[in-house]
């Protein structure tokens, strides 16, 4: 079981990135342009919101609080929000606007990645949920308010 948790916590993110890239390169040229615009806004906005939120909320990692060795080595820094979950959910959010099936698959990967990181002892559930909420806010803002009104995706 540990090997599956370690795979999900450390390596599943790379499969999510690969699937997002394959989808991107398989898309039509006009759709790729829209994906780029949406991603250029959503991904950095998610990162900025995550960094801001980490200044206001500190969550010591479970292995620090519980004084145990996690399944994967990790620094004893702030666990909120989860960077792996943030990236996976940002990829899922961007893809979801263009392809519901692949977006849903990437969101399922997001849940698996987050759950694996909790089970590995490097994050609390709040770190995972926080990442997903941050991306939901960022992608909503990008779609509704930041993108020019004339460039509906």
Image (cartoon, grey):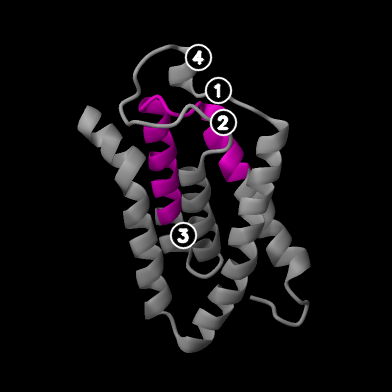
Label the magenta part by its dominant secondary structure. Answer: helix
Contact between labelled residues 2 and 1, with CB atoms less than 8 Å apart: yes
Left/right of residue 3 with respect to residue 136 in the rendered view: left
The CA distance from mark 4 to mark 1 is: 6 Å
Residue found 48% across the figure and 26% down from its top: 76
Residue found 50% across the figure and 64% down from its top: 95
Q: Is residue 63 above or below residue 35?
A: above
Q: Quadrant of the C terminus?
A: bottom right
Contact between labelled residues 1 and 4, with CB atoms less than 8 Å apart: yes
Q: Quadrant of the N terminus?
A: top left
Comparing labels 3 and 4, the label whose residue is closer to the camera: 4
Asked whether 59 or 129 is in front, the reply is 59
Query: What mark, if any, has residue 126 been given in the picture?
Result: none
Contact between labelled residues 1 and 3, with CB atoms less than 8 Å apart: no
Contact between labelled residues 3 and 2, with CB atoms less than 8 Å apart: no
Residue assigned mark 4: 65
First in sequence: mark 3 vs mark 1:
1
SS label for mark 4: helix
Magenta region: 106-133
First in sequence: mark 4 vs mark 1:
1
Q: Position of residue 75 (x, y in %)?
A: 44, 31
Asked whether 40 or 113 is in front, the reply is 40
Residue assigned mark 2: 78
Residue assigned mark 3: 103
Asked whether 21 or 153 is in front, the reply is 21
First in sequence: mark 3 vs mark 4:
4
First in sequence: mark 2 vs mark 3:
2
- As drawn, the residue found furthest toward the top would be 67
Asked whether residue 113 is drawn in magenta, I would say: yes
User: Hey, which quadrant is residue 141 in on the image?
Assistant: bottom right
The CA distance from mark 1 to mark 2 is: 6 Å
Comparing labels 3 and 1, the label whose residue is closer to the camera: 1
């Amino acid at each position: 079981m540990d090997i599956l948790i370690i795979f999900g916590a450390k390596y599943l993110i790379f499969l999510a990135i690969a699937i997002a890239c394959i989808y991107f390169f398989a898309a039509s040229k006009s759709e790729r342009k829209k994906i780029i615009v949406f991603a250029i806004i959503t991904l950095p906005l998610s990162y900025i919101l995550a960094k801001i939120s980490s200044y206001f909320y500190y969550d010591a990692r479970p292995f620090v609080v519980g004084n145990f060795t996690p399944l994967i080595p990790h620094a004893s820094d702030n666990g909120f929000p989860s960077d792996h979950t943030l990236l996976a959910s940002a990829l899922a959010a961007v893809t979801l606007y263009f392809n519901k099936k692949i977006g849903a698959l990437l969101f399922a990967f997001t849940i698996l990645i987050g759950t694996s990181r909790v089970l590995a002892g490097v994050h609390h559930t709040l770190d995972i949920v926080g990442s997903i909420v941050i991306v939901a806010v960022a992608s909503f803002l990008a779609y509704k308010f930041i993108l020019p009104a004339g460039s509906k995706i």
